Image (tube, rainbow, N blue to C red):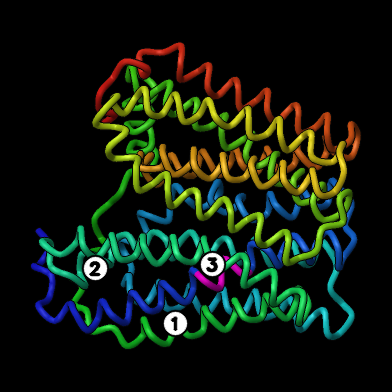
Amino acid sequence: MQDAPPSHGAPSFSRFWTAATLSSFGTAVTTVAMPVLVVTTLEASAFEVGVVNAAQFLPYAALGLVAGVYADRWRRQRILVWSSVGRAITLGAIPVLWALDALQVWPLVGLLLLFGSFSVFAFAATQSLLPRIVPRERLVVANARLDQSDAAAQTLGPALGGGLVGLLGAPVAIAVDAVSYLLDALLNAGLRVTEPPVDASTPRNLRREIGEGLRFTYRHRTLAPLALSTHVWFLANGAGFTALSLVALREMALSSLVFGLLVTVAGSTGLVGASIAPSLGRRIGAGPAIVRSRAVYPVAWLLVALAPTVSTAAGVALLTVALGLHGLAGGLENANDMGLWRRSVNRTSAAVGALLGGTAVAFLGASPALLGVAVVFTVAVAVAGLSPLREVRQVL
């Protein structure tokens, strides 16, 4: 049995919350800076853009299944601090290589693989550490504050990132994110938190635990279609956002600021969707809410496919509506937590999707590739909508 969380949680949570907020805003800046760096600064091919995007997801596939186990065997605070230091170093290497005129696509892929590996362990440690920082009765409030900060970062951060990229260039903007992780590490190193003794001697049968989770999910009448639909969704999403960066930054030649504002639209409508999701779930049930929300994605990506075929002004308007719909749908359905190892499967799907998206743009062109993305999103809707999920009031 774990010890009770320490009573001095408020000051430590303030540090933890500040650290999370800083890194969230840094991440939002990189959300815009990274595509600009790859597509515009490095002039990567469509396939290389897909590889770079896939590299950001692959560590979840390789390490997601074991990160939770080792987070239970090591000190969570130490994991969190050193993961942030590792992310700061890997991101900080990008502007250094650029200044030395040595930054190329494949070294960047290696750095992103390292960055993602640190992120997997940081996520696992965060999930385990928060209940040690605040008392159990304050966990809901603490999680709400973290969610609010993250939503604010997703809403304001991309516009800030677009402005920074325009003023300083993409590599320097990424350096801002690196600094945010250093500050994150410093703040979390000063947390006053008592962790239970680490028992590394207790054997863990990872294969058995994963097998139990797989059997429970994929034999369940409602969780199975939800999981499969989500895997297909991540495949389409990985392909879609790879193609989107190529369309917006290369074919339509939009500025980094405009691109950042488009990403901001998705964050803003996502916040709106998240705020009304609970009432929608209560009114029509969780299953129907998920199915109806997912039905919005094919429409959104059809609009994205049309964007490069019209004038620039009309294309920007279509992208604005499309990303607004995408963010709204995501906010409406995102209350469902699939668990850490299932996130690993989802990130694997996203990595495959990113590779397929880049390859499709290279061989078919942007609009046909995006039409294919809309079709795959439709498959995700069909998997969920033709299953018992469409009738359930509450998803487990």
Quarter occupied by the N terminus: bottom left
Residue 315 found in image quarter: top right
- Name the foreground residue: 374 vs 257: 257
Residue 212 found in image quarter: top left
Residue type of the residue flagged with mark 1: Ala
In this rendering, would 270 be left or right of 55?
Answer: left
In this rendering, would 185 be left or right of 101?
Answer: left
Q: Is any atom of residue 393 visible in this view? A: yes
Which residue is labeled 2 in the image?
198
Question: What is the CA distance from the residue labelled 3 to the residue labelled 1?
Answer: 23 Å
The nearer-to-camera label among 2 and 3 is: 3
Which residue is labeled 1 in the image?
185
Q: Which mark is residue 162?
A: none
Which residue is labeled 3 in the image?
156
Q: Position of residue 160 (x, y in %)?
A: 62, 72
The nearer-to-camera label among 3 and 1 is: 3
The nearer-to-camera label among 1 and 2 is: 1
